[in-house]
Amino acid sequence: MLVDSHCHLDAPEFDADREAVIHRARAAGVTQQVIPAVDAEHWPQLRDICRTHPGLFPAYGLHPMFLDSHRPEHLQQLGDWIARERPVAVGECGLDFFVEGLDTDTQQLYFDGQLTLARDFDLPVIVHARRAVDAVIASFKRIGKLRGVVHSFSGSPEQARQLWQLGFMVGIGGPATYSRANRLRGLVAEMPLEYLLLETDAPDQPDAEIRGQRNEPARLSFVCETIAELRGVDAAAIAAATTTNAQRLFNLPSAP
């Protein structure tokens, strides 16, 4: 069994064949998926998709790359949604210092607001940190009493160690399957297994076998196999450990 800890199954790229995508995922052993939101407008759709399909679990948040869609009142609305819907996490939230035109102060405003909600509701956070890992770590320390995952981790081993010391996991997906991703593959090969989550970030970040194509959660099995090869262990051991990690962090039920 596998848990895709980060998949945007509500994205429009899946509107034409979402049922088939879910079926292929289950056939590949991906029995549970955490689906993080990106903006307030699509929270209801995300909720309905997760209600309709067993094994899909929502997280609600405001993604930094969708800054133009966010309004200050959305933070209050997010608190109401969390209280009423009881998601498995807050997110996707975070900071993005790579994309031009995303105001840093405004990003920080929404990020801090969501971290505070996660702390107050005692929920994990799902964090986007592109060229912003140090700033994200500083935010964790400032808000305090947080846990969660920095997804699609691409930072240094030292940054990863700082995250682990704060009780955070790192999400690893398709990028680790590329042979030239030397630093990331080195980290995956040596890191403590208790801090590792598997993810696809579908429909984005396809693995090396489907480069340039739409990604989907069934591809998590290839990510798992690659990580197992890098660590010199059986894929079943990686699947078991990362499933346990995800179920513990997000308080997921045991998969059937």
Image: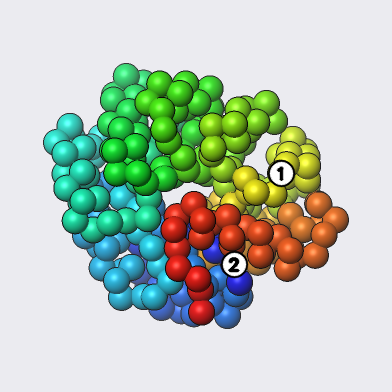
| Mark sitting on residue 192 | 1
Confirm or deny contact between disc 1 and disc 2 (CB under 8 A): no
Q: Which residue, given by chain and number where applicable, does mark 2 sit on? A: 2
Image location (x, y in percent) of residue 219: 61, 65
- Sequence-wise, the earlier of marks 1 and 2 is 2
Q: Which quadrant holds residue 221?
A: bottom right
Amino acid on which disc 2 is placed: Leu
Image location (x, y in percent) of residue 234: 80, 65
Compared to 47, does 1 lie above or below? below
- How many residues crowd around disc 1 within 10 Å: few (fewer than 14), some, or many (20 or more)? few
Q: Which quadrant holds residue 108?
A: top left
Q: State the residue at coordinates (66%, 65%).
A: 240
Evaluate whether residue 9 shows in this view.
no
Spatial CA distance of label 1 from label 2 is 18 Å
Amino acid on which disc 1 is placed: Pro
Left or right placement of residue 37 versus residue 55 in this view = left
Helix, strand or loop at mark 2:
strand
Left or right placement of residue 240 versus residue 36 in this view = right
Observer-nearest of 51 and 88: 88
| Mark sitting on residue 21 | none
